[in-house]
Image (cartoon, grey):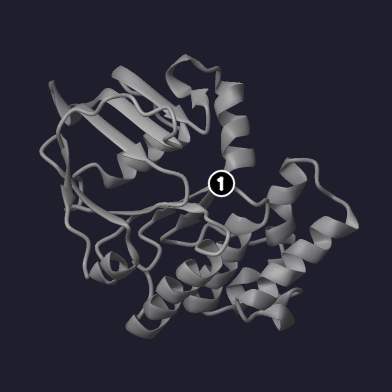
Amino acid sequence: MQPLESDGNALICLRGVTKRYREGQGLRAVFEAVDLDVQRGEFTVIFGRSGSGKSTLLNLISGIDLPDQGTIRVAGLELTGASEQARTLLRRRKQGFIFQFFNLIPTLTVGENLLFPLELVGRTDSAALARAKELLDRVGLADRWDALPDRLSGGEQQRVAIARALAHDPEIVLADEPTGNLDDENAAQVVRLLTEMLRPSRKTLVLVSHDRAFARIADRVLTVGHGRIEEQAPTP
């Protein structure tokens, strides 16, 4: 991508970001001086080979990792100058996460998994309980509130994970290979659910995947590789 001028309205803004990891006796550059803006309400889908930096990009946006050079601003917070506590609070309050392997807490029921992100931000009232139940109903699993995750199929677990990611009403949803562990039918259902649940409320989605079906719902399609981020034309 060409260098970008600063956009004060972008919800996510990367400028001159470089990230390297030690590999053997040397350093491998995952990103070299990359720029990226993601606007509020935008669906950005990122493709790339395994090891190209897709998950690293999500870790940078979430503040889990920090760049070696450059700046990252997310929802008004400058991550590169923020404390670890401030970055943690950003993840709890402003971001929701969906993972390839669901990452549900196995010792908690489905309902308790949905309530957990609400409890982390101090929401333990009846309104929080009502929101969790409403979301579980929207993903078609209202009758599984008391079930443990290991009693659910993979597709059902991912639907719970989508509901959990939205429980605390985040501005940004980060999804890392959300269909990578699902068959075609369940993968298609995840694509549909993300569209139906995020578009009306103008959530911002940054999703990395090998699944080209996500290109159909994207506002922007990016590829990562060789230290760069390149933009493609979205699928008509």
User: Relative to residue 227, is residue 174 depicted above or below?
Assistant: below
Work out which residue is located at the far right of the displayed protein and give it: 126
Q: In x, y percent, where is residue 48? A: 19, 52
Query: Which of the 4 image quarters holds residue 58?
Result: top left
Query: Which of the 4 image quarters holds residue 184?
Result: bottom left
Q: Is residue 69 left or right of residue 50?
A: right
Q: Is residue 220 left or right of residue 42?
A: left
The residue positioned 40% from the left and 38% from the top of the image is 59
The residue positioned 52% from the left and 33% from the top of the image is 75
Q: Is any atom of residue 204 visible in this view?
A: yes
Image mark count? 1
- Front residue of 150 and 125: 125
Residue highlighted by disc 1: 171
Q: Is residue 217 left or right of residue 90?
A: left
Callout 1: few (<14), some (14-19), or many (20+) C-alpha neighbours within 10 Å? Answer: many
Q: In x, y percent, where is residue 157? A: 55, 71
Q: In x, y percent, where is residue 211? A: 27, 67
Q: In x, y percent, where is residue 5? A: 27, 25
Instruction: Name the kind of residue labelled 1 in the image.
Output: Glu
Q: Is any atom of residue 105 visible in this view?
A: no
- Front residue of 152 and 88: 88
User: Relative to residue 186, is residue 9 depicted above or below?
Assistant: above
The residue positioned 58% from the left and 33% from the top of the image is 90
**Which quadrant is the C terminus positioned in?**
bottom left
Q: Is residue 88 left or right of residue 204?
A: right
User: Relative to residue 186, is residue 68 depicted above or below?
Assistant: above
**Which quadrant is the N terminus positioned in?**
top left
Label 1, secondary structure: give it: loop
